[in-house]
Image (tube, rainbow, N blue to C red):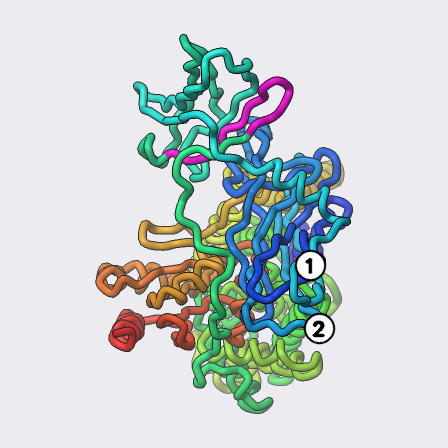
């Protein structure tokens, strides 16, 4: 039964990741890019529309999604000199989801975006406009999706309207919040906010009043909003504050209500400062020469991949698995040298097969337009859960709760007559799977190079990476005489075997923490329930071995049912993705968007960009040991350094594009910008001195 769980994990994980990282079904959201103008003219501004039509019962989100969700976001690809302004959002609807309250749109919605045309644009010809629209569409489950949108517009001497789109844009503008024709002010009354509407006496009665704050956590979104009328047309809407401790005078948002059968929407209070969606042209990011994957040759990239694979053996995610396999060699020290060498070859074959399988899937998905990179399978909650279950099962085996064959790390024992070699092969598979959260030095440029070449070159680079990971164990088995340096087999091995269970348990616990960032509390509860079922399945299977015939059958049925239940709970996790990102922001940090980065660079600011993920061990170590240190934070503050953090825990095409622009295929990535200058790429393993030197150098250069 344990072998079955591990086989499901090893063989199904990449496919599950591929299935879940694809686009949402096209019938859920039909998106298109439209223009109010049929032609462009130099120096003029025209309005574009991002039109989304949702399947009945499904919805997308407003700029503030409420208690969960993510707003649609467009990553523009514009010709030089063009720029777009802030998105104009129609008034949303309140969408209750069990105990939560979300803000969004059902049916259809058109987001309006102003496009500024450069003065120098020559008349004649056609201008291509395009971008990637990312969104989260929800019913009872939520599915992230994206759409590649494009529009070609001719250039003339005047801007001509497009009659075919006139109705769409008229309706879209009618749905935008207007300036209120009467005073609206917010006050604090006891524990609540009151939104006072000073309407003229005798004004028509209003119903269904609702307020949508711009800022997340400004209000308790799910709390009832109570409307009360007073004398002389005075009316107020009572609102329950949220966790942000916002002052009433800073409370901004959109007020909607029905008046004489017509829905009204008014803008209230200040809007939060927002960077425009794009600014004046900013030079494309250019990686530092030392890390520029475009400057690599095939052989230098292969050498870096080999070195990166070697270093992976020292990473905390891989070392426990390698230690278990080395311990198994102690028992084989007295065997024939040819047999020991075959174990090394089987382990290497498992590593190479896994690396090539993951690489082939990654290359194929990227060729199909998916915005993914190294570690992409860990963006799938189902894969993270299965990996945690598999490691938990390995820990149980090491702890003696369940016995898998007679060999240590014999994950595949009993599959064939030559069980030991199968065990070595599947240990190589496991080592590969647990290595993917880590990025070692030398890996970044090599993997980035691999994904910009043809499939054959890419697979060769990944094979070198796998060979580097397998090389220490392969070398140990290639020279069996070195095994004589290890202690003789004895009772101490059981003690060491039991001790090695705990770093494996720790890795499983860390994966459950990653899962909590991806699926939230409800999903975490289901994952923990699956973990309990895996433990019960292992226990029941082991007990059935010692039972009589009837008991053996019942025990195995119970174990099988528990395992099926665990897999079902894991499969359900994809529908419980948390709306928010998995990486928490500290007070000085801002969430990364390309628009915000462009705006800060246009202002001449120094910007530190941190591309991270909850499942990236290297990222977490760098943050805790370097970036969160008092000296680094003080240097950021003293130099007025903007700190943008990009969260790649779940799929994010905008972050993937930035990684690719710098020749990277995975996180971490650390960049320092000085205004519109080129980015300085920092090492993937940070030290306090490296960060301080980069920030101070950029600060001095900016003067």
Inspect this view and state whether residue 536 appears.
no
Residue 144 in the figure: left or right of residue 317: right
Q: Residue at x 63, y 61 (%)?
A: 131
Q: Is residue 301 above or below residue 281?
A: below
Tell me whether the residue at label 1 lies in contact with that at label 2, contact meaning CB atoms closer than 8 angstroms.
Answer: no
Relative depth, front residue between 297 and 325: 297
Q: Position of residue 447 (x, y in %)?
A: 56, 76
User: Badge 2, how many Cα within 10 Å: few under 14, some, many 20+?
Assistant: few
> Could you tell me if residue 643 is visible in this image?
yes
Magenta part of the chain: 251-264
Is 255 magenta? The answer is yes
205 in the magenta segment: no
Q: Is residue 161 left or right of residue 373?
A: right
**Where does the C terminus fall, quadrant-wise?**
bottom left
| Label ID, residue 149 | 1
Seen as rendered, the residue at the extreme top is 231
Q: Position of residue 289 (x, y in %)?
A: 45, 85
Q: Is residue 550 above or below residue 149?
A: above
Choose top left, top right, bottom left or bottom right for residue 259: top right
Secondary structure state at the residue bearing disc 1: strand
Nearest the eye: 640 or 613: 640
Q: Which residue is mark 2?
A: 125
Marks 1 and 2, how far apart in space? 20 Å
Mark nearer the viewer, 1 or 2: 2
Dot 1 surroundings within 10 Å: few (below 14), some, or many (20 or more)? some
| Left or right: residue 234 compared with residue 695 | right
Residue at far front of view: 157
Q: Is residue 387 above or below residue 128?
A: above
Q: Residue at x 70, y 53 (%)?
A: 161
Q: Is residue 270 left or right of residue 32?
A: left
């Amino acid at each position: 039964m344990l072998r079955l769980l591990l086989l499901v994990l090893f063989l199904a994980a990449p496919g599950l990741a591929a299935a879940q990282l694809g686009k949402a079904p096209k019938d859920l959201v039909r998106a298109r890019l439209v223009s109010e103008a049929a032609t462009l003219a130099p120096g003029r501004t025209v309005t574009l529309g991002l039109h989304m039509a949702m399947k009945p019962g499904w919805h997308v989100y407003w700029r503030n999604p409420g208690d969960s969700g993510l707003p649609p976001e467009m990553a523009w690809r514009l010709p030089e000199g063009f720029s777009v302004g802030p998105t104009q959002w129609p008034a949303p609807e309140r969408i209750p989801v069990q105990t939560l309250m979300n803000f969004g749109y059902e049916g259809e919605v058109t987001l309006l975006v102003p496009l500024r045309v450069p003065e120098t644009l020559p008349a004649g010809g056609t201008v291509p406009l395009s971008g990637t629209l990312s969104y989260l569409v929800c019913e009872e489950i939520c599915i992230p999706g994206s759409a590649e949108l494009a529009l070609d517009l001719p250039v003339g001497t005047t801007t001509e309207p497009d009659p075919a789109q006139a109705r769409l844009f008229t309706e879209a503008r009618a749905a935008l919040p207007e300036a209120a024709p009467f005073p609206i002010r917010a006050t604090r009354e006891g524990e609540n906010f009151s939104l006072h509407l000073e309407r003229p006496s005798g004004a028509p009665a209003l119903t269904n009043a609702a307020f949508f704050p711009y800022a997340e956590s400004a209000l308790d979104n799910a709390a009832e909003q109570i409307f009360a009328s007073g004398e002389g047309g005075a009316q107020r809407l009572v609102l329950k504050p949220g966790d942000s401790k916002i002052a009433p005078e800073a409370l901004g948002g959109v007020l909607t209500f029905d008046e004489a059968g017509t829905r009204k929407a008014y803008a209230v209070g200040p809007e939060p400062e927002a960077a425009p969606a794009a600014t004046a042209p900013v030079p494309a990011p250019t990686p530092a020469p030392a890390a520029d994957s475009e400057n690599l040759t095939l052989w230098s990239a292969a050498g870096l991949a080999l070195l990166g694979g070697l270093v992976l053996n020292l990473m905390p995610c891989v070392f426990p698995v390698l230690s278990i396999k080395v311990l198994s060699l102690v028992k084989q020290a007295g065997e024939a040298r040819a047999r020991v060498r075959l174990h090394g070859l089987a382990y290497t074959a498992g590593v190479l097969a896994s690396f090539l399988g993951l690489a082939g899937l990654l290359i194929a998905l990227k060729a199909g337009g998916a915005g993914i990179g190294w570690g992409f399978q860990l963006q799938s909650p189902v894969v993270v859960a299965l990996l945690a279950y598999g490691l938990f099962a390995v820990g149980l085996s090491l702890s003696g709760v369940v016995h898998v064959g007679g060999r240590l790390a014999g994950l595949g024992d009993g599959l064939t007559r030559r069980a030991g070699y199968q065990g070595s092969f599947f240990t190589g598979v496991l080592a590969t799977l647990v290595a993917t959260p880590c990025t070692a030095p030398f890996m970044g440029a090599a993997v980035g190079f691999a994904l910009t070449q043809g499939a054959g070159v890419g697979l060769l680079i990944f094979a070198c990476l796998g060979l580097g990971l397998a090389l220490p164990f392969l070398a140990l088995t290639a020279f069996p005489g070195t095994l004589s340096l290890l202690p003789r087999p004895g009772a101490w091995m059981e003690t060491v075997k039991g001790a090695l269970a705990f770093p494996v348990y720790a890795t499983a616990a860390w994966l459950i923490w990653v899962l909590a960032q991806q699926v939230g509390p409800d999903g975490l509860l289901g994952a923990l329930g699956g973990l309990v079922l895996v433990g019960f399945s292992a226990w029941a299977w082991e007990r059935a071995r010692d039972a009589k015939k009837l008991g053996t059958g019942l025990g195995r049925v119970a174990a099988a049912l528990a395992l099926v239940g665990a897999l079902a709970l894991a499969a359900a996790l994809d529908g419980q993705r948390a709306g928010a990102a998995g990486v928490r922001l500290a007070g000085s940090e801002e969430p990364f968007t390309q628009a915000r980065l462009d705006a800060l660079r246009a202002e001449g600011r120094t910007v530190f960009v941190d591309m991270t993920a909850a499942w990236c061990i290297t990222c977490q170590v760098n943050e805790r040991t370097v970036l969160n240190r008092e000296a680094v934070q003080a240097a950021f503050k003293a130099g007025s350094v903007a700190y943008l953090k990009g969260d790649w825990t779940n799929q994010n095409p905008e972050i993937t594009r930035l990684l690719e622009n710098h020749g990277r295929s995975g996180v971490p990535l650390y960049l320092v910008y000085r205004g519109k200058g080129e980015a300085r790429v920092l090492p993937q393993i940070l030290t306090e001195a490296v960060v301080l030197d980069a920030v101070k150098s950029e600060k001095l250069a900016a003067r």
